[in-house]
């Protein structure tokens, strides 16, 4: 079927957006649209320019016979700051306060539009790194991990507190919770990770970093490599942080239960992502 150029541009854009970081050859597009490679190259140049101007991302060109193009999801700094400011405003809502000074975040994590924005922010921070898989721990980190994975086009593996029959044989380790100082257990299916896999760890909340540090230790059992750590919310209260190198979107500075006040600021996202915008 012969496509008109307008149809070709729309279909090509949709195809690339659905497959971030996947190498697509010019030959594939040429055969798909029954068009000359020169015409396809011109179309890709238009898409690349539009993506970059609108802050959608960019197209990476790989030269050579085995080359092609890759869509790399990215976000402009201005847009990233707007999203993080929105997150700060939402999280600072005093209605989130629960007994004991805990915060209710389930509504944010259950909102697909917000989670998609969070996922794109985190993916943008690691867009230039080679990542094979995203790891998170059940349960609240799962939506965020899947959102980021959709922009990096990688699978998600889920660490659990106890083994499930449906997981098959598992690897189990004990770790010390950074906040409670208690010994806890985490479990991961042996089929989840390949040896040498480059893993991005994603979680919803980090206080002292005991859970994240436990996942880092779990990677060693699989001979996997840590590619990065990213969290939606970190706490300033931690006396001793067990994790040093990580990306956070929002930082929780203080919770005043008596006055019903939550003070948050932007996390270290722009410091860690410096030069990526």
Image (tube, helix red, strand yellow):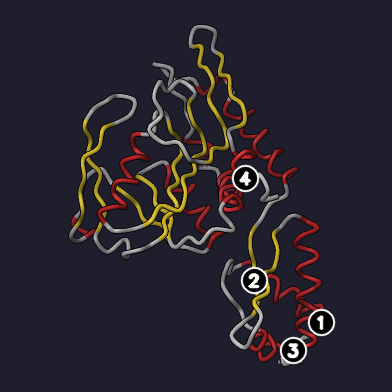
Mark 2 Cα shell of 10 Å, populated few (<14), some (14-19), many (≥20) = some
Q: Is residue 10 left or right of residue 212?
A: right
| Nearer mark to the viewer, of 2 and 4 | 4
- Disc 4, disc 1: CB below 8 Å? no
The numbered mark, 2 or 4, whose residue comes first in the sequence reads 2
Q: Nearer the viewer, residue 33 or 189?
A: 189
Quarter of the image where one finds residue 74:
bottom right
* Distance from the alpha carbon under mark 1 to that under mark 2: 16 Å
Q: Where is residue 273 in the image (x, y as percent from the top left)?
A: 62, 45
Mark 1 Cα shell of 10 Å, populated few (<14), some (14-19), many (≥20) = some
Q: Mark 4 points at which residue?
A: 273
Q: Residue 5 carries which label?
A: 1
Q: Mark 3 points at which residue?
A: 37
Instruction: Kindly identify the residue that appears in the image at 18 percent across and 60 percent down.
Output: 169
The numbered mark, 4 or 1, whose residue comes first in the sequence reads 1
Q: Give SS at disc 2.
A: helix
Q: Name the residue under label 2.
A: 16
* Distance from the alpha carbon under mark 4 to that under mark 3: 36 Å
Mark 4 Cα shell of 10 Å, populated few (<14), some (14-19), many (≥20) = some
Q: In this view, does 94 lie to the left or right of 142?
A: right
Above/below status of 129 relative to 17: above
Q: Give SS at disc 1.
A: helix
Mark 3 Cα shell of 10 Å, populated few (<14), some (14-19), many (≥20) = some
């Amino acid at each position: 079927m012969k496509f008109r150029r307008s149809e070709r541009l729309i279909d090509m854009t949709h195809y690339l957006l659905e497959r971030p970081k996947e190498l697509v050859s010019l030959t594939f597009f040429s055969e798909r649209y029954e068009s000359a490679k020169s015409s396809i190259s011109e179309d890709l140049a238009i898409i690349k320019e539009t993506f970059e101007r609108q802050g959608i991302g960019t197209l990476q060109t790989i030269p050579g016979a085995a080359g092609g193009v890759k869509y790399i999801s990215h976000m402009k700094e201005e847009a990233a700051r707007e999203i993080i400011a929105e997150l700060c405003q939402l999280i600072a809502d005093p209605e989130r306060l629960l007994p004991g000074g805990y915060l209710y975040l389930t509504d944010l994590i259950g909102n697909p539009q917000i989670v998609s924005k969070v996922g794109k922010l985190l993916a943008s921070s690691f867009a230039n790194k080679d990542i094979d898989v995203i790891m998170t721990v059940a349960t609240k980190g799962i939506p965020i991990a899947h959102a980021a994975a959709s922009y990096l086009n990688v699978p998600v593996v889920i660490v659990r507190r106890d083994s499930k029959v449906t997981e098959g044989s598992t690897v189990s380790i004990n770790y010390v919770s950074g906040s409670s100082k208690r010994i806890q257990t985490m479990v991961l299916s042996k089929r989840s990770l390949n040896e040498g896999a480059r893993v991005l760890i994603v979680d919803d909340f980090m206080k002292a970093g005991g859970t994240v540090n436990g996942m880092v230790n779990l990677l060693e059992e699989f001979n996997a490599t840590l590619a990065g750590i990213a969290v939606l919310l970190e706490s300033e209260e931690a006396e001793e942080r067990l994790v040093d190198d990580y990306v956070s979107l929002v930082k929780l500075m203080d919770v005043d239960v008596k006055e019903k006040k939550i003070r948050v600021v932007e996390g270290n996202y722009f410091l860690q992502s410096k030069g990526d915008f």
